[in-house]
Image: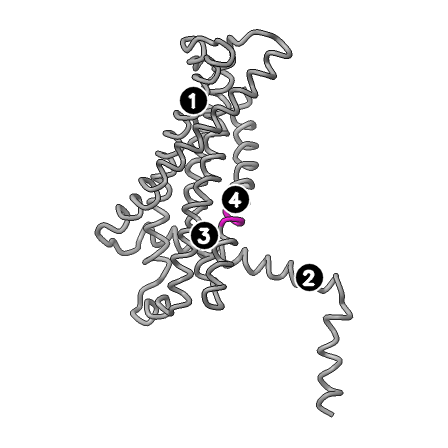
Amino acid sequence: MTAQTVSPIDDQPEELGWVGHLGAAAIDLLIGGRELYSVFVRTLYYTARGRREKGAVVAQMYEIGNKSLFFLSITMGFIGMILAYQAGLQAKRVVPDFTMLGATYLELLVRDLAASLGALMLATRVGAGIAAEIGSMVVTEQIDALRMCAADPIDFLIKPRFIASIVMTIVLIVWSGAVAFVSGAITAYLAFDVPLQTFFNASLVDVGDMSVGVAKCFAYGAAIPVVSGYCGLSTFGGSEGVGWATTRAVVNTSLAIIILNFFISGAGFLIFPG
């Protein structure tokens, strides 16, 4: 009787097939989105009204900013060389005039490329580190110990990283954008004989470009610790779960950066059409 009673229920997901799996995935996505939104709202709340632990934000600024400086500088330097070289090749095929190469390149860097590419690089290092650290605390029951001591993990762990990430993301992207522009200028000089005085041209950069670029820096800096912290807090299953949480943090943070890029760029073109 027990086997006959249970078997129809157990076989029900098999009968649903791909429709059932699709529905289950949609439900999981909605639940995850709701929990992520809850983490974001609580982070904002504790940022405004949470406790102030001396040195916590400064320590995270060092971890996020100083330890990412060399990695981001090298990466954006090579990316700047590649972009300037490819842009010069395309310009040479159409109009062999490199007068506006630097101005166009700088506008693209300020408006989109520096923020988006730099944030994707930060997601691989900072996001993975946050998820691994918090995930390890979850599987070793340190998060449960925090809750037993009446300390909210959002306030204790995510909020300092949230504040530090916003500040240091803006600083790092400004620095890495400058590195990419200088490396692009050197590449254009060596490959296409473009004078440095000609390449260093900011005539096309306006207030709209700078506003969109700063908005992206701010949004990306807020998204990286929130998404990665959520992935870390939702860890389960021991050390294997920490590995999955790290992978999820990198993937989800990168996806969040791409989605934010789409919406901020669209709003920027509507507000600053020129």
To which residue does mark 1 refer?
A: 183
Which image quarter is the C terminus in?
A: top right
What residue would you read off at disc 3? 228
User: Marks 4 and 1, Cα distance to the nearest angstrom?
Assistant: 25 Å
Location of residue 273 in the rendering, given as x and y in whole percent from the top left corner? 55, 22
- Secondary element under disc 1, as helix, strand or loop, is helix
Could you tell me residue 89's position as x and y percent?
59, 16
- The amino acid beneath tag 3 is Ser
- From the viewer's perspective, is the residue at label 2 or at label 4 nearer? 4
Horizontal and vertical percent position of residue 252: 53, 49
Give the left or right position of residue 63, taking residue 243 as reference: left
The range drawn in magenta is 250-256
Residue 222 found in image quarter = top left
Q: Are marks 2 and 1 in contact (CB under 8 Å)?
A: no
Which of discs 3 and 2 lies nearer the camera? The answer is: 3
The first of marks 2 and 4 along the sequence is: 2
Mark 4 and mark 1 lie on one chain; the one further toward the N terminus is 1
The first of marks 3 and 2 along the sequence is 2
**Circle number at residue 254:** 4
Precedes in sequence: disc 4 or disc 3: 3
Q: Closer to the N terminus: mark 2 or mark 1?
A: 2
The type of residue carrying mark 4 is Ser
- Which residue is depicted at the point 48% across and 9% down? 193
